Amino acid sequence: MPSYNARKGGTVNPVTSRSSMFHSRLPELRRAREFLERFCEGAGIERGAGLKLNLVVEELFLNTVKHGHRGGADAPVWVTVSSDESGIHLAYEDQAPPFNPFAAGARELLEALAETRREGGLGVLLAHGLTRASEYAYLYGRNRIRLTLAA
């Protein structure tokens, strides 16, 4: 049964939501991209917004694989996407060591790495710039990142 979200004026719109799990390995990124593309097609999300969503997930996923699991692991990565009139909502969870890429200290570190032309950090800064809201928590052994992008 679909979920519904009431809009102003009493009209009701369906809320589209999808979840999937991937292993923290580079080849799984292709499956994640396909998952996001199917979601965007089904939810009627414009191509530009879908590309931004895909870029954000790609950056988070690459950080999980490269840095969180030092090249990959069978550890799960959970991706949940939904859309409503307020935007596209992403919940991204992994079991890598705790790291909040959107914390003020992390942001300063990533900006410093970018200035010295060292590898890493630019993608997360770009992803953060594409979002309207972000939230991070480390709960039950998982990094949980929640983001909202414009639809």
Image (spheres, helix red, strand yellow):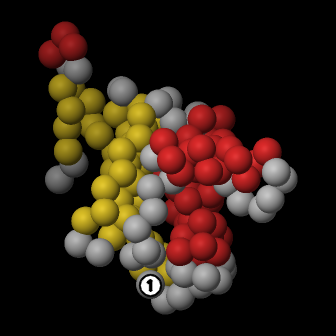
Judging depth in this view, the residue of 147 and 13 nearest the camera is 147
10 horizontally vs 113: left or right: left
58 horizontally vs 122: left or right: left
Q: Which residue is denoted by mark 1 in the rendering? A: 75
64 horizontally vs 89: left or right: right
Q: Secondary structure at mark 1?
A: loop
Give the residue furthest to the bottom: 74
| Residue at figure coordinates x 58%, y 36% from the top left | 130
| Residue at figure coordinates x 36%, y 27% from the top left | 86
| Residue at figure coordinates x 21%, y 32% from the top left | 5
- Residue 97 position (above or below residue 48): below
Q: Is residue 21 visible?
A: no
> Where in the figure is residue 9, as x and y percent of width and height?
19, 10
Local crowd at mark 1 within 10 Å, few (<14), some, or many (≥20)? some
> Where in the figure is residue 94, as x and y percent of width and height?
41, 71
- Residue 148 position (above or below residue 70): above
- Residue 111 lies in what quarter of the image? top right
